[in-house]
Every structure is written in C-alpha cells, then in structure tokens.
Image (spheres, helix red, strand yellow):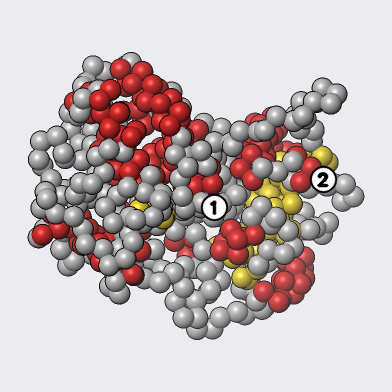
Amino acid sequence: MDVGRVSVGSPAGANPTPWLPCPRREGVWCAKYGDRISASVVNQRVPFSYSDTAPGFVVSPGARVLCSYPNDGGTMSKTCASAPSAAPWTRTGCVPGCHKGGSGFKNEHEGPYSPDALQTMMYQHIKYHSYDNNDRCRQGNGCRYNEVVLDAAAWADSLPGVIEAVFVPKAGGATAEANARRIHAALLREYRLPAEAVPLVTLDLASSTTPFATLPVKPMPALAPDAAPAPEPEPMPAVCEAVFSPESKFWRLWGTRETWRQSAAGERQCWEQLGGDAYFERAGKATQCDVNWFEGAQGELGRVESRAHFAAPAPALLGFDGDLYRVCSAAVGKKTWWESGNDGDFNNEIAHRCVGASRNILRLLTGRPGWGWTMCQNLQWQVCAAKGKLPGQRLQGALEFATAPPSLMLFEWREPESYPCDGGKKCAGRYTVGDVFFAEACLFVRLCKNGRAVFDGAAADCDFDEAGFAEFKGELKARTRNLV
C-alpha cells in the first residue's frame, strides 16, 4: 500500500490545503521543492513512516513516481532550479528530488532507484533498514522509512482521485486526530465529495493484519420524508475564509495614511476619502471604467488622457507580480524574469509588456491627488474587469489568472514575503503586493454569482452579483469603522 505523508503543524498555523504541492513562485520558502512530493511505501516488513504522529494521505498506486530511496533520500538538496523566476524548472537531464543529470539512477545501495525499480528498492529497504541513532531526520523515530518521490504536476492534475484516504497515526493522539478531521473536512468541501469517497482512517503501524480502521464522521442531516434537498451554497475556499475572518488584516488594507501600511483605529478610509456611498455607487455600477489604469507609466502610455492601445481584445490578468511579469513577457517574446539593476523600473516595464501582450493589468503609478493607487481604486478596477468594461477588454467579464487562485497558501497570507516585505524586511503593521492578490482572488468569490468557478479557473466570466457587492459594502464599512 502506498502511504503519502504530510506534516500539518499546529491547528493555529496549519496549511488549510495540504493536499496541494508547494506553489512554485517567488517569495515562497518551499518554491524550489514544488515540483515533487515525498511519500513512503509501508508494509508488514517495514512498517515505518516519516512521522509517527502527523496526519497524511493514503496515495493511489496510480501516482506518478519519479524515483525512490530505501532510506531518507536527502531530496531537498536535489533541485532542478534555484528559483522559479531564475531559470526553467527542469534542466535537461535533471529529475526533481532524484538527480541533476550525469550518473542518473543507480538502482542499488542508497539509490536513487528509477521508477520501474520500486520493487528492487523495497528489497533493499527490507534487507538493510536500520535505526539511525543520530536521528538525522529529526523525527525521533530512527529514520527507518523509505522515500518515494512523486511528480507534483501529475499529482495536482490527478486531484482528488490520487488521494484514497486521510489517515491519522494511532500514536498521534487527540491533537493529530483533530488535525486529520480538519484536513478531511476541508478536502471534502474543496472538491464537493461525499465522506465515503475519501474515508478518514486511523493507521496502526504495529498491526500486521488490520492497519486501517475507519473513523466515524459527522453524517449529513437527514431529510424529512418527501422533502426536496435544498441546493447547497458554493463553499468558500478555505484560504478565503481566513482572508475574510473578522480579525483578518484584510480589513486594514483600506486606509489612507500611507501605502502598504495597515490602517489603524480612527484612520480615514479610502472609500470615505473618495466620497463614501457615492464611491460605492460608482464602483458597484462600474461607471468609471474608461480611464487610464496605467497612468504614470513612462511615455504616452502614462498620460492622463491616454488609453492603452491593445493589438487584440485584452482580458483582465490577475496574479502575483512575478507571475504577471512572466506571462506578459512570454507573450511578447522577452525574458520572463526581472533582474534588479538590469531591466529598468519593474512597474514601468511590466505595464508596457502587458499592453504589448494585450493584457489589462492595474498599474496606477501616478501621484495625482485622488487617483493614486489604493485598495479602493483596486476594487473599482476589479469590478470593471468583472463586468468586462476595462478599456480594450471587449469581452464580457474576460478574466485570466497568471497565478491560479487554488494554489494560494495560507502561510503566504500570514507571513508575506513580497514587496515591501521582501528580502527579509520586517513587516509588522504592513501589507504587501501579494496580499492584494489574495484580496482580489477572494473578492471574486463574493462578488460573482459563479465566484467559486471563477476562483477555481472553471469560468472566465464573472456573473456579477449586485446583492453580493451590497453585502460586501456593508461589511467593509462596518469593519473598517470599528478597527481597534
């Protein structure tokens, strides 16, 4: 049986979507490992896993194997690129987590073993596994597990079917079971699955006959006789539940004191500065869309009266800045990563490249009073994009994502590393460029009747929800007025 493992940490800091590979983008500590997932094969002869207590996934035998090791393979040192924006992810001859070319697979001793040599690896593991007194894996269990490296791209394409069950080790206790139940419920909600499709089980590595036992989960409420089932509302993505939680920094992105500074109690909010209810009327009705959203860029493009000249209909493109730059640069045949000191001003360069690529992005670089960038201008642009009213868009609600919203990780929201908190800068009391994309992606869930489909990438058109906008307006006004 194939048993994948994933460490989920404490309930307060846990990743809400641990079934996803680490996103391969700048500012994410695990980005260079996002091309692989590590797992272990467990059986009667070698009943050892990476962690004796952390929940994990029972993985389908159909998962694509890249290589394997009869021990901990030290795979974190076996990368195929130093950073996602610096080079292609896979160099010629390099296999993530396995080897960087050259001698390649060894299929003997410590490996790595090729995908078709899994049985040979298991023989080696059974024959020579030993307790590591130095505990180099830092798990306190002697590091006697094997390591099977899976293809992260194939994994992501196979979700949720690649996961056959969520397990909690018997030795994990109440805390591990609570984490496993949270993961299981989130997985079912994310993919709209019944509980029996992916069972929740305990894993007893000491049992040679019945290692798995099904845990009960809360059943769906029974329907009254002859009652028609009520349509279930689209579930909010787990990361968006955190973004819109009452204590979230999202409600502090709307101040006017200083760009990138979270607003404080009593601070005037941007929607108040722009006219209060009159601002929300303009934004919700998308009556102020035919403006220059590139104002302040160099040359003709940045003039107040100018409009971008797109060669083709220009959908709205959203994502992290590095991904926007990559997509637009690739479309115009230029280098897809930006190097400080060599490639000019980033904001000006990305503005011109995206216009050349016939993509609408928001890049207000002006200092003109009342028109410099704020989250209120951002919301206004986003509603225009959702309604297909940006200059040159020409297609109702045409939306594209350079960064797939389902790849957003909660730790990126809680501990951002994008500007102005990049390079290890302290970020207390600030918010970042990356935080703005989190807000955009999750706002689509609230502002579009088909918001979950837009978030998931299943729809390129937003069916704008006027009632949803009104509800958001009321909550935004109330929460920003009551900051403490």
Q: Amino acid at mark 1?
A: Ala
Viewer-side residue, 300 vs 70: 300
In the displayed structure, 470 sits above or below 192; it is above
Q: What residue lies at 70% left-to-right and 55% top-to-bottom?
A: 161
Task: Name which residue type carries label 2.
Answer: Phe
In screen coordinates, is 82 left or right of 182? Answer: left
Image x and y of residue 277, in percent? 28, 22
Identify the residue shown where x is 43% and y is 32%: 466
Query: Marks 1/2: CA distance?
Result: 36 Å
Instruction: Give residue 194's quadrant in the image.
Output: top right
Residue 420: quarter of image: top left
Question: Quadrant location of the C terminus?
Answer: top left
Q: Dot 2: few (<14), some (14–19), or many (≥20) neighbours within 10 Å?
A: some
Q: Is residue 195 above or below residue 355?
A: above
Q: Which numbered circle lies on residue 212?
A: 2
Residue at 70%, 29% in the rendered image: 230
Residue at image position (54%, 67%) is 97
Badge 1 element: loop
Q: Position of residue 332 (x, y in %)?
A: 29, 71
The residue lying toward the viewer, choosing from 202 and 133, is: 202
Secondary structure under tag 2 reads strand
Name the residue nearer the viewer: 19 or 224.
224
Residue 185 rendering spot, x and y as whole percentages: 66, 36
Left or right of 73 on screen, residue 398: left
Find residue 62 and report its horizontal and vertical position in percent: 72, 64
The residue tagged 1 is 458
Residues tagged 1 and 2 counted as in contact (Cβ below 8 A): no
Which quadrant of the structure image shows residue 37?
A: bottom right
Earlier-in-chain disc, 1 versus 2: 2
